Amino acid sequence: MMLAAGMAVAQDDPAGTYKGKWNGASTGGDFTLQLEKAGAAWKATVQFTLADNPIPTTVKTLKLDGKRLEIAYEFDLGGNKLLSQLEGELTGGALTGKYKTKALADGSPLDEGTCEAKRYQ
């Protein structure tokens, strides 16, 4: 019985690398999210592609509450500082969510769409 409980906890552990796709209003690309436990806190890295070019990001906030994930990350696109906020759910080794991107300079909305990824490792 305890072995079964331990296996259930391990399967529900969200740590790992998730790879998939994002789709916005007019474009899309690859998406990678890495989640790892750092002591009592969670740490994340996010990278995506735009026109097959990798776009590195800086994670600003991360909230992981059960299956719910909220993450905000900044990135630079052609000299423009942008912020994406992704809200999603981690279930069965997969992430499904929606994001919104805005300009940091004035808060104007730029894009919104969906993201889907599966745990790679």
Image (cartoon, grey):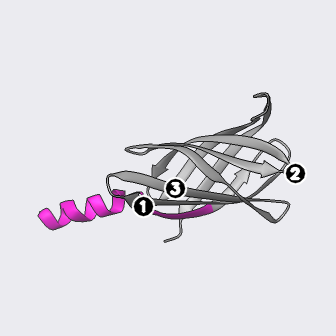
- Mark 2 residue crowding within 10 angstroms, few (<14) / some (14–19) / many (20+): few
Q: Is residue 56 left or right of residue 13?
A: right
The mark that comes first in sequence, 2 or 1, is 1
Q: CA distance from mark 1 to mark 3?
A: 9 Å
Residue 76 % position (x, y): 78, 50
Range of residues picked out in magenta: 2-19
Q: Is residue 15 left or right of residue 88?
A: left
Q: Nearer the viewer, mark 1 or mark 3?
A: 3
What residue type is disc 3 on?
Answer: Ala
Quarter of the figure with the N terminus: bottom left
Mark 3, residue position: 44
Mark 2, residue position: 78
Circle 1: element type? loop
Q: Is residue 64 left or right of residue 19?
A: left
- The image shows residue 91, relative to residue 18, as above or below, that is above
- The image shows residue 117, relative to residue 67, as above or below, that is below
Mark 1, residue position: 15
Marks 1 and 3 close (CB-CB < 8 Å): no
Q: CA distance from mark 2 to mark 1?
A: 32 Å
Q: Is residue 118 magenta?
A: no
What residue type is disc 1 on?
Answer: Ala
The residue closer to the viewer here, 92 or 15, is: 15
- Mark 3 residue crowding within 10 angstroms, few (<14) / some (14–19) / many (20+): many
Secondary structure character of the magenta stretch overall: helix
Circle 3: element type? strand
Residue 92 % position (x, y): 43, 57
The residue closer to the viewer here, 119 or 33, is: 33
